[in-house]
Image (cartoon, helix red, strand yellow):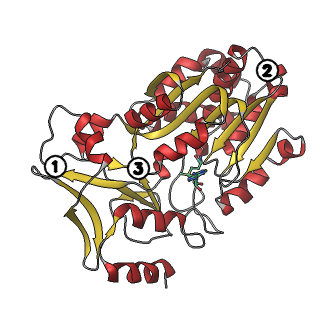
Amino acid sequence: MNPLYDILKTRLAIGPVPAAEVMALGLYHPEHGYYRRQTASWGFDGQDYYTALDLGPLLGQTLALRLEAAWVRLGRPNRFTALEPGAGRGWLGRDLLKSATGPFAEALVYVHLDDNPAARRAAEAALAPFLTAKRARFAAEADQLEPFVGAVLSNELFDALPAQPWRWDGEGWTREVLTSAGPEWQAAEPGEAGGWFASQTDGLEPGDGSIWCEAMPSLVHELAGPLEAGLFIAVDYGESADRLLAKGADLRRFKAHGVDGKWHEDLGRADLTADVDFTRLAFLLEQAGLSELSQVELSKWVRTHAPLEQWGADWMNLPTPERMQRTENLLQLTLPNKMGSRFRVLEGWKEKND
Ligand SMILES: C[S@@+](CC[C@H](N)C(=O)[O-])C[C@H]1O[C@@H](n2cnc3c(N)ncnc32)[C@H](O)[C@@H]1O
C-alpha cells in the first residue's frame, strides 16, 4: 500500500485538493516523498528520468568556464564559492571541480545544498576526493547561508518545485484539483497569479493557462540574498511566460523513462515536474538585485561558451568509447529537438554593494 494515498484520502474528505498540494505531497512528504525517500530511481540506471548530467561532463565543463570568467571579473578573489541548490547526486559539482584548473581551482569551493537523502549519499561518493581536500562541502536547506562571493548554480531545481496549473475559461480562472472522483478544473480566485498571467499577454483566450509556482519568490530571495557578488545561473526546463500561457502549461509525470499528465498517480514513486516560467524567474532575480539578466537555449549557451574546436581536437586522444561518449554528449546538448533545445539557461549578475 502507498501511505501517501491514506494521507490524501483524509485530505480529500475535507474537499478538493489543489494539484500543487498533491505535487508537494508526492515529492516532499518528509518520509515518502519522491525526493525525500531513502531509495532513488533516477539516472539511466534508475527507472524514471535522467538529466543532462547523465549524458556526460560537458555541462559541468562549460559551467567551469563560465564560473572562471566570473571569478576573473570579480578580481580573482581568494575564495570563490559555488553554491548548488537542488544539487542531487553532486555530479555537476564533481564535473565542475574536475575541470577547474590553476588559481581558479584553488579559489573554488563547491557547496552542495539539497536535503534529498538518497541523492546526498550518492553525492558523498561522487564528491569524496573533493570533500577530503575541503574543496567541497554540504549544506542543509534549513541552514542560514553566510554571505559569499562566487556563484549560485542549479540544474533542474525550479522545475521540481510544487506548481499549480490554471486555465482561463473565457469568463474566469479555473485551477486543477484532485477530487475523490479524479482530477477536475474548478473555478477559483487566482490572487497574484491572475494578475501575473494577465500582464503577460495582450488578451486571454479560452484554454490559455499556465502554472504558478508559489515557492519561487522565497527560494530566489533565499539564494540571491547571501550572494554578495557574482553569477546566478539556472539551467532548467521551461519557457517565457507568454509562451507558457499560450500552450496551456501543465504538470508532467516521469515514470520509467516515460512522460504523461497523470500527476496524481504513483505519488512518491514517480517524478513530477512543471515548466519554469523564465520571465517570472528573471523578474524575481531583478527584484533581488541582479542585473544583466539573459536567457538562451542550452544548445546556444554551450555553443557560445564552450571551446568546441579545441575540445574536439583533445577528444581525438581519448580511447574510442570515451570519445564516442563525449560526441554523443555534445550532440544531445546541441542538436535541435534534443535536450539542448528543450532546456534554457538563465544568467544574472550581482554587483558588489559598497
Ligand atoms: C530534478 S532534481 C535535480 C537534481 C540534480 N540537479 C540533477 O540535475 O540531477 C531536483 C532536486 O531539487 C531538490 N530541491 C527541491 N527544493 C529544494 C530547495 N528548496 N533547496 C535545495 N534543493 C531543493 C530536490 O530534493 C531534488 O533533489
Q: Residue at x 19, y 45 (%)?
A: 208
Outermost front residue: 354
Q: Residue 213 carries which label?
A: 3
Contact, mark 2 vs mark 1 (Cβ under 8 Å): no
* Residue 304 shows up from this direction: yes
Q: What amino acid type is highlighted by mark number 1?
A: Gly
Q: Is residue 4 left or right of residue 165?
A: right
Establish if 282 lies above or below 314.
below
Q: What amino acid type is highlighted by mark number 3?
A: Cys
**Total labels drawn:** 3
Label 1 environment density (alpha carbons within 10 Å; few <14, some 14–19, many ≥20)? some
Residue 37 on image: x %, y %: 61, 68
Residue 206 on image: x %, y %: 12, 47
In this rendered view, identify the residue nearer to me: 44 or 80: 80
Q: Is residue 82 left or right of residue 241?
A: right
Q: Distance between the residues labelled 3 and 2?
A: 35 Å
Location of mark 2 (residue): 77
Label 2 environment density (alpha carbons within 10 Å; few <14, some 14–19, many ≥20)? some
In this rendered view, identify the residue nearer to me: 109 or 326: 109
Location of mark 1 (residue): 207
Label 3 environment density (alpha carbons within 10 Å; few <14, some 14–19, many ≥20)? many
- Asked where in the image residue 56 lies, by quadrant, the reply is top right
Screen quadrant of the C terminus:
top right
Residue 45 on image: x %, y %: 60, 58
Q: Residue at x 51, y 63 (%)?
A: 27
Q: Is residue 190 left or right of residue 97?
A: left
Residue 332 on image: x %, y %: 50, 35
Establish if 46 lies above or below 126.
below
Q: What amino acid type is highlighted by mark number 2?
A: Pro
Q: Which residue is drawn at 44% across and 31% down?
A: 282
Foreground mark, 2 or 1, reads 2
